Amino acid sequence: QVQLVESGGGLVQAGGSLRLSCVASGRISMINAMGWYRQAPDKQREWVASITKGGTTSYADSVKGRFTISRDNANNTMSLQMKSLKPEDGAVYYCWCPVIGINYWGKGTLVTISS
């Protein structure tokens, strides 16, 4: 089992920045890829970004160039630096990692963008 806990959400003005963090615990030696998803009200959960244990990153087109995902394997943490935030970025952001075919999720952290 893997446990994921997010932090760093909050209220920020459009154009501003915010940094989200995720701490993993449990069977962390089995974790390879990790990432972030988000879900806005009345919308489906969507993938935002992911990073492999080796540091290879991928981003959704909607956040490319504005968000940066990073990872500290020694401390079992992952971060998402978000810049130039737009109202449409407002959502609950979830930390995610797949382990042996099982998707693990954090409880989410709310990001609210004021225009």
Image (cartoon, rainbow, N blue to C red):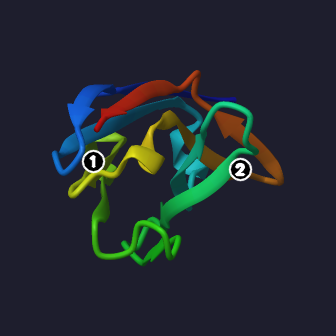
At horizontal 17% and vertical 46% (from top left) the residue drawn is 17
Which quadrant of the figure has residue 23? top left
At horizontal 69% and vertical 29% (from top left) the residue drawn is 1
In the rendered image, the vertical position of residue 98 relative to residue 20, given as above or below? below
Identify the secondary structure beneath mark 2: strand
Give the alpha-carbon distance from disc 2 to disc 1, as whole Å.
18 Å
Q: Earlier in the sequence, mark 2 or mark 1?
A: 1
Q: Residues within 10 Å of mark 1 (few under 14, many from 20)?
A: few
Residue 6 position in % (x across, y down): 42, 27
Which quadrant of the figure has residue 38? top right
Residue 98 seen: yes
Whether residue 61 sits left or right of residue 69 in the image: it is right
Residue sticking out furthest to the right: 101
At horizontal 52% and vertical 58% (from top left) the residue drawn is 48
Q: Which residue carries the number 1 mark?
A: 74
Whether residue 97 sits left or right of residue 21 in the image: it is right
Residue sticking out furthest to the left: 16
Give the number of callouts.
2
Residue 5 seen: no
At horizontal 29% and vertical 75% (from top left) the residue drawn is 65
Q: Residues within 10 Å of mark 2 (few under 14, many from 20)?
A: some
Whether residue 30 sits left or right of residue 95 in the image: it is right
Identify the secondary structure beneath mark 1: helix
The numbered dot on residue 99 is 2
What's the residue type where badge 2 is placed?
Answer: Val
In the rendered image, the vertical position of residue 24 relative to residue 97, given as above or below? above
Where's the C terminus, which quadrant? top left
Residue 49 position in % (x across, y down): 49, 62
